[in-house]
Image (tube, rainbow, N blue to C red):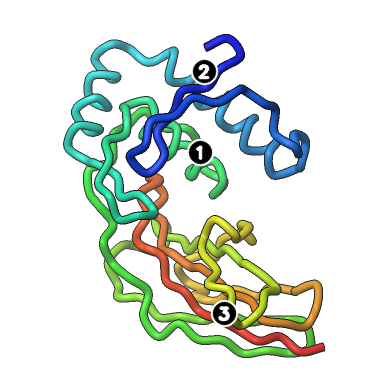
Amino acid sequence: MGALVYNTWRGINYVKIHTDPATQFSSAQVTLRGLTANVTVAWQALSDGTRAQWYTYANKHPSTSCLAERTRLTAYNWYVRINVRRLLLGGAISSVVPAFELKHNITNLNYDTDPLVIYIQWDFPVAYSPATLYYEVYRAGPHSPAVHANIKRALRRGHATYISQFFEDSVPSAGIYTYFVRPIHSTGIVAPWSRITVTAVA
């Protein structure tokens, strides 16, 4: 509101002066802002009946925060979250409300390495057809052994298809890296993250 921002952080209400982000024009920021803008326009064009379906979905599907707290997202929040994921996977914006939750986890997450190249591999219980399931891969690092890397410190490296169950990543230098991998359905619904730590050598 004006020059002030009202927010809640870990259950604490606060007010701060609005400041612009230090880095406003990274390629990742520009891409996500563009996708979010496109999805917002699509949301504004929905009929009242379709929006009502998303309101119902939002009420029935609280989201889990990084602190394992169950919080309610608005219908608009869910619509943007799901459709931005779909666009990142090369899909299209959809007004259809997801009909299920993706609960399956990756198994046997492991890796192999060459100099400055890391190969992530995994298994996955067959649950959905290959055409509807992908894997999203994020990487944090290089970092020290004392750092407990989390998804907030990671950058999206891309996605792999169901059939491949394999991801190849070139890293900038030797060191310790943490990868986060999760199944993502073409509807935009995701399963929990799996994590693996890898040491790359020059």
Tell me which residue sits at (75%, 37%) in the image. Answer: 22
Which mark, by number, is residue 41? Answer: 2
Q: Quadrant of residue 78?
A: top left
Closer to the N terminus: mark 2 or mark 1? 2
Tell me which residue sits at (76%, 39%) in the image. Answer: 23
Position in image of residue 117 (x %, y %): 73, 81
Callout 3 environment at 10 Å: few (<14), some (14 to 19), or many (20+)?
many
**Gap in Å between the C-alphas at discs 3 and 1?**
25 Å
The three-letter code of the residue at mark 1 reads: Val
Position in image of residue 30 (x %, y %): 71, 35
Q: In the picture shown, does residue 179 fall above or below 59? A: below
Q: In the picture shown, does residue 164 fall above or below 62? A: below
Callout 1 environment at 10 Å: few (<14), some (14 to 19), or many (20+)?
many
The three-letter code of the residue at mark 2 reads: Val
Position in image of residue 60 (x %, y %): 17, 37
Please tell me whether mark 3 sits on a helix, a strand or a loop: strand
Q: Which residue is mark 1?
A: 84
Q: Looking at the picture, tell me which residue is in the foreground, 194 or 163.
A: 194
